[in-house]
Amino acid sequence: MTRMTPPATSTNDAPSNSSPPVNDDNNLQRSSTSLRKERRRSLVQASMRDAFAGAAAGAFAKTAVAPIERVKLLMQLRVSASGSSSSCVATCRAGDVPGGSALQVARSVYETQGSLAFWRGNTPNVVRQAGAAALNFMLMDWYKGAISPIMHWSLSLPSNRNVEDRVKRRKLISSFLSGGLAGGTTTTFLYPIEFMRTRLAMDVGATKETRLYPRGMRDVFLGIWKSDGIKGFYQGYGIALSGVMVYRALHLGGYDAVKTEIMHRRRYSEHAPREAARTTDMSLTMSERFAAAQIVSIVAGTLCYPIDSVRRRLMMQAGQPLDERLYRNSFDCFRKVFVNEGIQGFFLGIGPNLIRSFGGAVLLVGYDVFKGMIGV
């Protein structure tokens, strides 16, 4: 009699659960979504901190050097705003623009207008500079992030240079490009405030009765709006846009580039210890950062000063009838200044401007300090 044995059970015959792990997939999706939200939140917080640090540094720097800047403007626009000049503008009907050296101009302002006159126009200047610094630093970081993929892609292109030199070069290019783009974007939004600041600084009246704009920004705004409309606030905007992109590329981008160069040389110096490979921006001393900022501010301010002179002369023409304006456009202004005044006509007030570059250095270093204080 044949003994029956039960068939062997195979693991393949066991019921299998072939449905996907729904819970795991949902958890992964939720985790990915929360990670993206966290990254966006971190980006927004970092941008806000950048904006706050830049605004605080800008307001502090501009207030500190406001007297020097007003003396610079009076010297720079002396010809355009002189009562005896063919390019006389309404802002100087209340009095004569003081002449002479920077010390003579400062003494004249103090004796005829008082000590507070050195800060005339400082309110719109602080508003503009705080907004400009906030936007410049915030947009510079944003543009640098936008340019980063292109810079990384360019590393894949064939080249005879080693990787370290190529990475360094692209960091420099990224710094200059992002600084220029940030400056151009900021100028477009804040140019009317810069325009009002210039007009207030050139109002040389000593009392409310003799001043052209006794109520400050409000009088400037209403006067220009009635005569020229919105376009009146953008006199000289074209040359200003090109100039500020060059200036910000040299100022912001140059400062970033100099810091990168210092860290690069320190990192690969034969005398540097092993931990130098972890060199960061915060490892730079205050004196190193201030020296870098001062050099960059002087170079950028000097190279871009002729453009600044032209745009401010065009600003001073706003409110005049078209047939009474001395300069038709920026190119005409360049030509007439060169023919009538020579090269020195573009550099009137350059002395106080070089001293004022201290404020530009304070702005750059102050931004680093404020970022460190708020934990960026």
Image: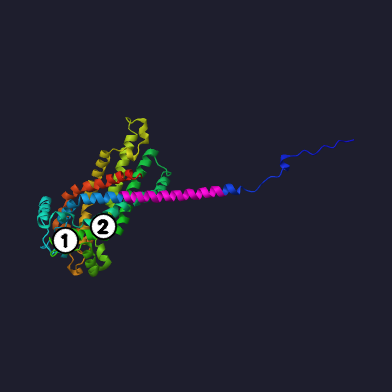
Quadrant in which residue 373 is drawn = top left
Residue visible at 60% across and 49% down in the picture: 22
* The residue stretch that appears in magenta: 26-53
Quarter of the image with the N terminus in it:
top right
What is the secondary structure assignment of the residue under circle 2? helix
Which residue lies under the disc numbered 1? 203
Q: Is residue 41 above or below residue 273?
A: below
Q: Is residue 117 left or right of residue 263?
A: left
The way the protein has been coloured in the rendering is rainbow
Query: Would you say residue 16 is visible in this rendering?
Result: yes
Pick whichever, 158 or 21, lies toward us.
21
Q: Is residue 31 magenta?
A: yes
Label 1 vs label 2: CA separation?
22 Å
Q: Position of residue 213 (x, y in %)?
A: 18, 64
Q: What mark, if any, has residue 240 been given in the picture? A: 2
Residue visible at 16% across and 61% down in the picture: 203
Q: Position of residue 212 (x, y in %)?
A: 16, 64
Q: Amino acid at mark 1?
A: Asp
Q: Which of the marked residues, 1 or 2, is nearer the chain's N terminus?
A: 1
Circle 2 Cα neighbour tier, 10 Å, few/some/many (<14 / 14–19 / ≥20): many
Q: Is residue 155 above or below residue 270?
A: below
Q: Amino acid at mark 2?
A: Ala
